[in-house]
């Protein structure tokens, strides 16, 4: 069992569950979570980074397990007062959550990079793992639908993923530089594994992979690269992954996700419900992947790390 | 009894009490409150206008009567979360109050003037009287103290008015243009009265008077100009007025306030406790001025308006 560094690529809710598992089974400082920032947007003058925030709240134990997003013990006085003033209320901002956006926006306005702000916040919240945006440059996910091109939050929150999706674009990704700490994590000696968390491949992982420096680092990477399927028996645990796959003309299933990641990954972890799936040129391993409890998260993290160590051992 | 328009110059808490009285005894649309904006500042990236907000909350019935500032039924989740993140917490921002600052900052960022934003907010809150900043241009009150020059909020909130005051400056006031709606109110036919509310003369009314266009409008004004003393029997009802007067080498008393307003006012309303005070060249009228209830506020408003009508009748 290696003690090396682990990199996880993650979007929001689903990815953050495995990121938490990895955070708990690894020693502080051994994990770098690279977060999707394609969902970032400016709203009410505030810089909002939904996936970074989900990772911050989840790894700090501040997430709301009942609602599945946002902070626990949240209050909603701001939204009520904003509605009275005729402000825009389609994006729900809890009073505590707002502190993150206000503090981030203030720090960015003073010239800090998104990486610096995120690192300051995660340290302040007592998180031992590094949380790093994929890039400090702006990348904006846009969704092509039967209602035309929509900004991500417009599609995801305002239109509740209802429009039919025909394509995606990650505006700015081609010019975006990999965030310095993300690049450093790939260069760290003794890199143990890179884990593609069970996030939506199209909306959450693809924007990360669209940053040229990240894709190059992944291709150069000597450590095992392992993806965990967000699809169990043809269904998404949460969110529009399966619906989007159908709309994109793809078979909603774990095999489609594996093919999507193509030559980038060495192994693919699927749910026990999909056991038996074989994909040419890829190590496929089955285990229960539904993460209801913290134990589930830690167990899946250990499974992925053990698989990485086996793959590395076989190469050596 | 005239039905004409009334202008009130007001700072925060004390002034807003009489502004509310005037709002309630006048017909909707008959009152324009010109607010001090020398206390305005940018904090956490938000444009905060404390005196405008106090007027908005007071005239909308949203003010917290127990605390004496801010909104009623307020929650404080944002401040707790901000403290966790290591943000600046010396200026208390309630969750509901925050909606005002966020919405104002957003609208200013989109190119609206402070006048336009304030008018939109007061209409949205169902306030019939106009609330107008003294100027759409930035004016910043600074306080010279034994700790050096301090920004207003630094002196007032962070240092709780503890430093000894030796002087004041209203940075930008000399170049500030009177807000268009304030100028229009002075030009309105049949102006009935101009009321200097019982706010701190040095911190709250002087910044308004420092805007050249406003002073000129006041000097040209044919309607009676009446000030209400914020000092009762040598004491301020609230805040540092009496303390500041002593530090500035002035006798803390109603007579000092009357002399401070000098040739600008026609009449001066003092508390019944100060009855008997006479000031050369000035009509002085005594009445209970301590405003505990809404009835007190409306009674004082009626007293001031009746005095204005008597003065106007005597001139005619």
Image: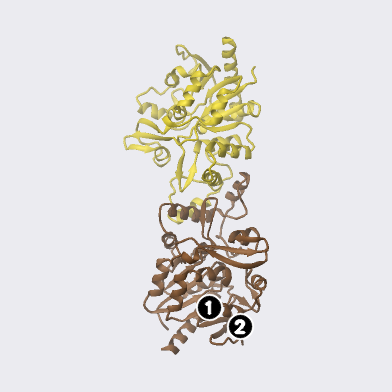
Chain colours: A yellow, B brown
Q: Residue at x 67, y 73 (%)?
A: B246
The answer to whether marks 1 and 2 sit on the same chain is yes
**Marks 1 and 2 in Cβ contact (< 8 Å):** no
Bin the neighbour count of mark 2 within 10 Å (Cα to Cα): few under 14, some 14-19, many 20 and up: some
Q: Is residue B75 left or right of residue B306?
A: right
Residue B269 at x, y percent in the picture: 55, 81
Question: Which residue was labeled with disc 2?
Answer: B272
Residue A230 seen in this snapshot: no
Mark identifier at residue A93: none
Of circles 1 and 2, which is in front?
1
Secondary element at image label 1: strand
Residue A125 at x, y percent in the picture: 62, 39
Secondary element at image label 2: helix
Taking depth in this image into account, of A57 and A32 the one nearest to the observer is A32
Residue A94 at x, y percent in the picture: 53, 46
Subunit of mark 2? B
Q: Is residue A230 left or right of residue A293?
A: left
Bin the neighbour count of mark 1 within 10 Å (Cα to Cα): few under 14, some 14-19, many 20 and up: many
Residue B209 seen in this snapshot: yes
Residue B216 at x, y percent in the picture: 45, 74
The image quadrant where one finds the N terminus of chain A is: top right
The image quadrant where one finds the C terminus of chain A is: top right
In the image, residue B207 sits, relative to residue A65, either above or below, namely: below
C-alpha separation, residue under disc 1 versus residue under disc 2? 15 Å
In the image, residue A116 sits, relative to residue A26, either above or below, namely: below
Mark identifier at residue B227: 1
| Figure disc tally | 2
Q: Which numbered disc flags the more N-terminal residue, 1 or 2? A: 1
Subunit of mark 1? B
In the image, residue A285 sits, relative to residue B47, either above or below, namely: above
């Amino acid at each position: 069992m290696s003690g090396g560094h682990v990199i996880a690529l993650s979007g929001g809710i689903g990815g953050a569950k495995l990121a938490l598992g990895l955070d708990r089974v690894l020693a502080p400082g051994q994990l770098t979570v690279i977060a999707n920032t394609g969902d970032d947007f400016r709203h009410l003058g505030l810089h909002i980074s939904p996936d970074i925030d989900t990772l911050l709240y989840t790894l700090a134990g501040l997430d709301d397990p009942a609602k599945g997003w946002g902070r626990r013990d949240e209050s909603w006085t701001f939204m009520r007062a904003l509605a009275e003033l005729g402000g825009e209320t389609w994006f729900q901002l809890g009073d505590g959550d707002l502190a993150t956006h206000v503090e981030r926006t203030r720090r960015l306005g003073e010239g800090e990079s998104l990486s610096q702000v995120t690192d300051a916040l995660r340290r302040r919240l007592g998180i031992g793992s590094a949380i790093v945006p994929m890039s400090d440059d702006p990348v904006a996910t846009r969704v092509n639908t039967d209602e035309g091109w929509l900004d991500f939050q417009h599609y995801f929150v305002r239109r509740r993923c209802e429009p039919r999706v025909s394509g995606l674009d990650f505006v700015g990704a081609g010019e975006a530089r990999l965030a310095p700490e993300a690049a450093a994590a790939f260069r760290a000696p003794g890199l143990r594994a890179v884990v593609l968390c069970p996030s939506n491949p199209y909306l959450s992982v693809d924007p990360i992979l669209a940053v040229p420096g990240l894709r190059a680092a992944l291709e150069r990477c000597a450590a095992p690269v392992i993806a965990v399927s967000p699809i169990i028996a043809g269904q998404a645990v949460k969110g529009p992954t399966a619906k989007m796959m159908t709309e994109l003309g793809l078979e909603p299933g774990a095999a489609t996700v594996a093919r999507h990641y193509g030559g980038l990954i060495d192994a693919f972890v699927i749910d026990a419900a999909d056991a038996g799936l074989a994909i040419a040129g890829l190590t496929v391993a089955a285990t229960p992947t539904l993460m209801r409890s913290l134990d589930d998260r830690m167990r899946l993290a250990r499974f992925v790390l053990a698989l990485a160590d086996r793959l590395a051992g076989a190469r050596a």
